[in-house]
Every structure is written in C-alpha cells, then in structure tokens.
Amino acid sequence: MQSEDSTSIAFRVNLDLIPLGRNVFVPAQKSGFEIQTSVLFNQYRLHFEYGSQRTKRGTNYDYNNKGQYFRIGPEINLLKNAKDGLEMTFGLRYAQSTFDNSFSYETNDFFGSIINIEENRQSTRWLEITTGLSAKIGKRMTMGYTVRYKIQRKPLTSDQLLPYDIPGFGRRDDSNEVGFNYYIGWLIPLK
Amino acid sequence: MKIRNLVLVLIIVIWGCNEIEQCQLEPNREGFTLGFFRSSDSTAYDSTGFTFITPGVTSDSIQSILPLDPLDTTITYIFGTDSTDYNLVLSYDVIYYLFSPDCDPSIRFFDLKVLSTNFDSVAVISDIVDEQIPTNFEIYL
C-alpha cells in the first residue's frame, strides 16, 4: 500500500505548540505564535516559517519587547523509505527578526531619574542548522519536533537601549542559541 | 536502581544548567572617578581641601564617585575652594540594557570627554565608567 509520504509534491503547515502553551500558562511574561509552512518535493523541502513574540520583564522596572521573525531554508528527510510517515530531517535556515523595545525605570542614584525609552524597528539576522523527528498521528496529521542551533547572528547596535530578547532567536547576550519547536502539522498532497 | 540513578543524573544536569545570576558581576558604575595631582611635581594629593563639589557629592573625598545624569549627555561639576571655584564640563554617551532580568537595569556611561575646565590640566585615563577602572581622569592643579 502506498503511504501518504510517497506523494511527490505536497504542502505542509505546522503550528508550534510551545508558544501556544506560553499563551495559556504565562501570558503576562511571554506570548506569541509560530507557523511553519513547507513545500515537499519527495524527500526535499523548502521551509518558510513566521512567528510573532512579545516578552515582558521586570518587577521594579518595565521592559517590553515585541517583534516578528521569519526563517527560510531547505531541508531533507533522511528517512526516505521509512514507513508510517516517520521523518528525520536535517536543514538549514536563514532567519531575520524585527522588533521594538521599550523600557521604563526610576533610578535610585543621585539624580533619581525616571527613564522612559523606546527603540523601534531594530533588526538582526542569523543562520540555523536544524534537525528533527516527526511521525504521522492521523491520515494527514503529523506531530514532531525541531531542534535548532542558531549561529552567526549579526551583532546589534543601539543608540540608547540594547534589547535583552530577540524574537525568534533568544537572548541578545548569547551569540549562539539553541531553539526547540514542538509542532502539530497538516499535510496537503498537491500531486 | 537504574531508574533512581537516571533520575539523580537528570536532577544534577538540570541543577547544573540553572543559571546563577550575580548582579554584583555587573561592571557598570553610576559615576566617574578622579585623581588629583600637583601640577608642580605630579605627586598625588592626599586631600584636596575642596569646600564643596556639586552636583551629587557631599564630601570632598577624592575617593568619591561623581555621578552622571542618565537623562543627559553633558554635566558640569563645580569644585569649590576658599579662593576659587574650579569647573569640569564633561560630555558622555549613555546606553541602557538588562544585565539579567533579576537585577536592576544597567546604565552604561562611555565616551567620556572633557569639554572645558579651568583646572591646570586634565588627563583622560579611561573614557569608560566601569568598576574595573580605578580612575577616569587625572586632574592637575
């Protein structure tokens, strides 16, 4: 019997469950979403991923970071002939993030200044090496995870406020980061 | 037994990965520092004898950290004596960031420059305000 993965061309949409979990459990600190789309040509894929993230930090200060990011890149399924739609993937991504920061704080120094700063439209880019596993959980549904090693981030500069968070990447003070997505996906055969 | 060992290893790994935030490692300081020297022979003053220093310094200790205003990029300091008042006008840049979300926000002062002064001379030792830098300016009078 022919499996669904033998479809030569297909389209797949994945929804990352981790940001959705944050929306439920820690909506005040971090919220957002991430959607991953891919076109599948046999065992080869072209991925486009888009996400939005909002982070709020601080108890005696108020730091807000809000932005969007996208990733694009190729991927290969290393388990070409596996049954039951099992996939083990290796891929590369180019990623870019654009975000706004705001910060307010009352200093406890001699001047006792009340600082309110906004720095908008900051952006950076980086590369990712990805690997992942996924399996079918229904006729056209898949579930899996992707591990990302994020490298070569372009350094950020700022006139006033250096961000702590970079949507889609992680922390600014880390030049390399590891990311993790756990997703549920829908496969749409095209040919 | 094996499961217990595995759980123990997992606990150690998770505990080991837990970041310990030490706010005191933050190197920034809220103000700059001065050293005072005699113009005649470059020997250091033990005490300057200033009657007042404004703004932000309540004693004439030469060990004082002289604060910088984070909402401005220039500041004028007046060093008063019985006979004359000295001034030191500085410019600087300011940047804000979070060293750690658990610490107070960090304010970094840098690119300190002397715009004007009526001291005999001022030498810039370091233009960065940092805990690791004992003196930003050497003042000769």
Image (cartoon, rainbow, N blue to C red):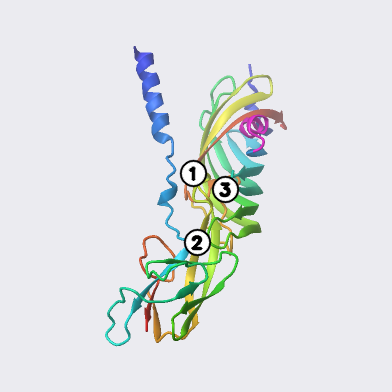
Question: Foreground residue, A152 or A105?
Answer: A105
Q: Secondary structure at mark 2?
A: strand
Please give the residue where the numbered disc 2 appears in the rendered image.
B108
Identify the residue shown where x is 62% and y is 58%: A115
Question: Foreground residue, A77 or B121?
Answer: B121
Pointer 3 chain: A
What is the quadrant of the N terminus of chain B in the image? Answer: top left
Indicate the quadrant where residue A181 lies: top right
Pointer 1 chain: A
Residue A36 visible within the image: no
Q: Nearer the viewer, mark 3 or mark 2?
A: 2
Query: Disc 2 residue type?
Result: Arg
Q: Secondary structure at mark 3?
A: strand
Query: Disc 3 residue type?
Result: Asp
Circles 3 and 2 in contact, beta carbons < 8 Å: no
Say if B30 sits above or below A77 in the image: below
Residue A131: horizontal and vertical position, in percent?
Answer: 51, 35
Q: CA distance from mark 3 to mark 2?
A: 18 Å
Identify the residue shown where x is 27% and y is 79%: B43
